Amino acid sequence: SKVLVINGPNLNLLGTREPHIYGATTLADVENGLVAQGKALGLEVSCFQSNHEGAIVERIHQARGEGVAFVLINPGAYTHTSVAIRDALAGVAIPFVELHISNVHKREPFRHHSYLSDLAEAVMAGFGTPGYGLALQYIATRLR
Ligand code: DQA
């Protein structure tokens, strides 16, 4: 099965960006780890990162044509602002897990609301970058 991992704005800075919140692991480390873990689980994992809302919307549309079975998305700040990404995920009707590296609920109030959570199959927050691997494990079980 195909799994698409999407990381939104500023997650390209992972490893150097506010390391007290997001840790020292880079996005390349995360993505390489997920591809390898996917292989071991029999999943074809592809990864996409963009700082542009429209590019993320278009990548989600493309996923339907590719037969992506599951999406793992960390929408970054678009979590709290983007009706467009919400509508794209609803539009393609691909099940997804919403992931946040930090526990958004113990941070600023504006991070407490998500435009995606009520559509997500599961939501994960506060597990740091290891959360990506835990979420992929869940997805593998779910697709089996
Ligand atoms: C984040 C949390 C968001 O509030 C923030 O804007 C991010 C990253 C996280 O992974 O913890 O960019 O999604």
Image (cartoon, rainbow, N blue to C red):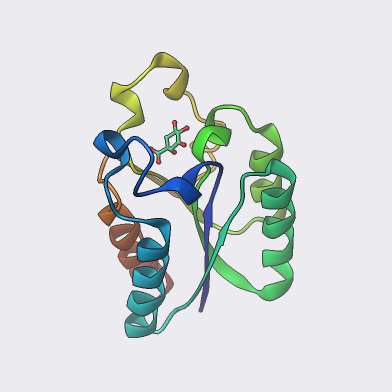
Which of the two residues, 48 or 87, is positioned nearer the viewer here? 48
Q: Position of residue 117 (x, y in %)?
A: 48, 37
Compared to residue 23, the image places residue 68 above or below, namely below
Q: Residue at x 70, y 47 (%)?
A: 88
Compared to residue 30, the image places residue 45 above or below, namely below
Position of residue 103 in the picture relative to residue 14 (left or right): left
Q: Position of residue 114 (x, y in %)?
A: 50, 30
Q: Residue at x 48, y 24 (%)?
A: 113
Q: Position of residue 49 (x, y in %)?
A: 56, 55
Ligand 1 rendered quadrant? top left
Q: Position of residue 4 (x, y in %)?
A: 54, 65
Q: Residue at x 34, y 43 (%)?
A: 101
In the rendered image, the quadrant that contains the C terminus is bottom left
Residue lying at the far top in this picture: please name it: 109
Residue lying at the far front in this picture: please name it: 16
Which of the two residues, 97 or 110, is positioned nearer the viewer here? 110
Q: Residue at x 33, y 25 (%)?
A: 105
Position of residue 83 in the picture relative to residue 8 (left or right): right
In this figure, what is the number of numbered marks? Answer: 0
